[in-house]
C-alpha cells in the first residue's frame, strides 16, 4: 500500500519546531505508516500557519483534488480559505477539513483506501468477449480513454476464437449453486461458465463483459448464470458487452471488495423506480429460483430477492468524465412479468429522479446494498469526474 503524500504548509522561514509539531499532530489523524511528508505532488495539504498560500499554489496542478486540513491556530484556516478561493477560480477541486473534527480522521482513512484502490486498477485488463451490443449506444468506452483515465487495458476477444462451450465441463460447485433449476439447462449454463472462466485465466483478465445475446440466438443458451457465478467468485462480469458497467464493477471491487448488480432502469418515478435484470450474483439475493432469460424465454436466469433495504446506485458515462451517484431505499421486491427476473422497486431522491429523466448517462446502473456514497464520491473527485450526488 502506498502512503498518502502530505505537504506541511507554513510561511517561509517557519521554525523547525512548527514543522515537527505539525508532523506529530497529523500522526493523530492518520497513522505514520500511511503517511509520507513531501513538498511536491501532495495528496493532502496540512496548513500550519498563515503566509503559506504562495508555496501551496506552486505545487497544485490542474485536474487535481486537494483535501486541505486546517487548525484554529496561527491563521491556518485563513490561509486555506485564500487558497481554496484561488483553486476554485482555476477549476481545481478541494475540500476543507478541520483537524479537530473526528470526521477528518474518517475522511483520511477513506482517502487512503480509495487512492490505493485506484492505483491497484492501473495495469488491469478488461476483456470484451464479442462486441458491444448494438443497442448500447452510450456504453462503449474507447480503449484509449479507458487506459488514460484508469490505466485499464481493453482486450477484445472474438467468440470465433474460443472453443465451443459444449466441449467444456460444468463444475460441481456450479451445479450445487444452481441445482434448483432445470438440470439440462443448468448443465449448459455451467459449460458457458467454464468457457468464460478458462478464457479469463488464459488471457489474464481482471474482468469481462460478454456479448451474450449471440449465445441465446445461435446456441439457445443464456449467459446469465455464468456471469452471476463469476461475480459471485469475485470476477467482475457484465453482460451485453457493456464496457461502462464492467468498468464500474472493477472500480467497486477495488474500493470495497464488492461487485455490484448491473440493472436496467425499467421505470422512473418520484414515488418509485423499478430496477430489474437477470444476472444478479446469488450473494446479493436472500433467496432465488432459476427462471428462463426474460427477453427470449430461453436458457436460465436468476430471480431472487435483493438483500438490504438501503442501497447505493452509480454509473459512469462513456467518456469517463461524468458519474451518476445516489443512495436510496428498497420499497418492494416484485416479480412483474413485464421486466427482467430479479426486480426491486426503490425510492430515490428527487434530484436523482430528475437526473435520470433529464440527463441520463445510459440505461444500466450498478447497485450495491448499503451506503457507499462517500467512497464513490471520493473516487469521482480523485478521477476528476463531474459527480452528480443526489
Image: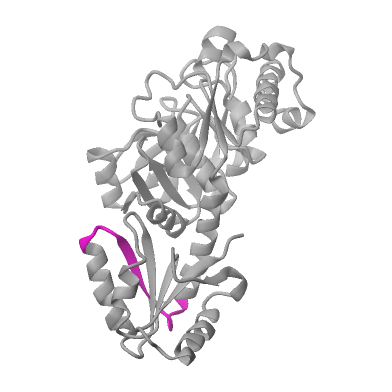
In the image, which residues are magenta? 89-103
Report whether 289 appears left or right of 87.
right
Measuring from the top left, give residue 359's x and y in whole percent: 25, 40
Q: Which residue is drawn at 44% across and 25% down?
A: 337
Residue at screen point 52% across, 18% down: 130
Relative placement, left or right, of 183 versus 66 is right
> In front: 28, or 282?
28
* Residue 258 to residue 378: above or below: above
Q: Quadrant of residue 134?
A: top left
Q: In which quarter of the image is the N terminus?
A: bottom right
Residue 71 position, x and y percent, is 38, 85
Q: Along the line of sight, which residue is nearer the eye, 72 or 244?
A: 72
> How does the figure colour the protein chain or chains?
one colour
Residue 178 is situated, as x and y percent measured from the top left of the image, at: 69, 29
Is 99 one of the magenta-colored residues?
yes
Furthest residue to the top?
218
Q: In which quarter of the image is the C terminus?
A: bottom left
Q: Where is residue 276 in the image (x, y as percent from the top left)?
A: 45, 34
Residue at the outermost front position: 13
Q: Residue at horizontal 65%, vertical 27%?
A: 203
Q: From the viewer's perspective, tell me whether residue 120 is left or right of residue 8.
A: right
Q: How many labels does the image show?
A: 0
Q: Quadrant of residue 149?
A: top left
Quadrant position of residue 82:
bottom left
- Residue 37 in magenta? no
* Residue at screen point 74% across, 27% down: 175
Residue 203 in view in this figure:
yes
Residue 253 visible in the current orientation:
no
Query: In the figure, 107 relative to 302: above or below?
Result: below
Amino acid at each position: 500500500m502506498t502512503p498518502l503524500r502530505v505537504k506541511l504548509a507554513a510561511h517561509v522561514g517557519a521554525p523547525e519546531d512548527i514543522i515537527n509539531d505539525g508532523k506529530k499532530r497529523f500522526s493523530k489523524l492518520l497513522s505514520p505508516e500511511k503517511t509520507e511528508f513531501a513538498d511536491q505532488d501532495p495528496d493532502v495539504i496540512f496548513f500550519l500557519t498563515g503566509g503559506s498560500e504562495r508555496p501551496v499554489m506552486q505545487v497544485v496542478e490542474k485536474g487535481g483534488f486537494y483535501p486541505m486540513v486546517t487548525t484554529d491556530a496561527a491563521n491556518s484556516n485563513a490561509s486555506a480559505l485564500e487558497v481554496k478561493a484561488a483553486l476554485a477560480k482555476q477549476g481545481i477541486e478541494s475540500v476543507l477539513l478541520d483537524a479537530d473534527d473526528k470526521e477528518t480522521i474518517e475522511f483520511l482513512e477513506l482517502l487512503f483506501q480509495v487512492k490505493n484502490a485506484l492505483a491497484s486498477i492501473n495495469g488491469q485488463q478488461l476483456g470484451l468477449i464479442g462486441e458491444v451490443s448494438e443497442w448500447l449506444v452510450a456504453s462503449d468506452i474507447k480503449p484509449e480513454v479507458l487506459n488514460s483515465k484508469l490505466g485499464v487495458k481493453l482486450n477484445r476477444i472474438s467468440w470465433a476464437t474460443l472453443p465451443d462451450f459444449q466441449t467444456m465441463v460444468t463444475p460441481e460447485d456450479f451445479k450445487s449453486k444452481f441445482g434448483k433449476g432445470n438440470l439440462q439447462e443448468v448443465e449448459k449454463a455451467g459449460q458457458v461458465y467454464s468457457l468464460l472462466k478458462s478464457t479469463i485465466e488464459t488471457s489474464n483478465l481482471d474482468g469481462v463483459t460478454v456479448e451474450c445475446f449471440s449465445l441465446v440466438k445461435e446456441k439457445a443458451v443464456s449467459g446469465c448464470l455464468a456471469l452471476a457465478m463469476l461475480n459471485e467468485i469475485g470476477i467482475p462480469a457484465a453482460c451485453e458487452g457493456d464496457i461502462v458497467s464492467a468498468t464500474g464493477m472493477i472500480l467497486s471491487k477495488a474500493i470495497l471488495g464488492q461487485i455490484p448488480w448491473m440493472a436496467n432502469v425499467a421505470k422512473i418515478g418520484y414515488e418509485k423506480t423499478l430496477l430489474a435484470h437477470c444476472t444478479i450474483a446469488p450473494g446479493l439475493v436472500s433467496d432465488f429460483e432459476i427462471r428462463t432469460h426474460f427477453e427470449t424465454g430461453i436458457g436460465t436466469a436468476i430471480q431472487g430477492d435483493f438483500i438490504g433495504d438501503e442501497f447505493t446506485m452509480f454509473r459512469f458515462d462513456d467518456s469517463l468524465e461524468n458519474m451518476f451517484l445516489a443512495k436510496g431505499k428498497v420499497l418492494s421486491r416484485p416479480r412483474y412479468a413485464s421486466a427482467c427476473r430479479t426486480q426491486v422497486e426503490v425510492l430515490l431522491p428527487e434530484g436523482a429522479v430528475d437526473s435520470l429523466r433529464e440527463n441520463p448517462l445510459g440505461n444500466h446502473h450498478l447497485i450495491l446494498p448499503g451506503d457507499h456514497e462517500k467512497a464513490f464520491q471520493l473516487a469521482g473527485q480523485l478521477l476528476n469526474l463531474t459527480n452528480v450526488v443526489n
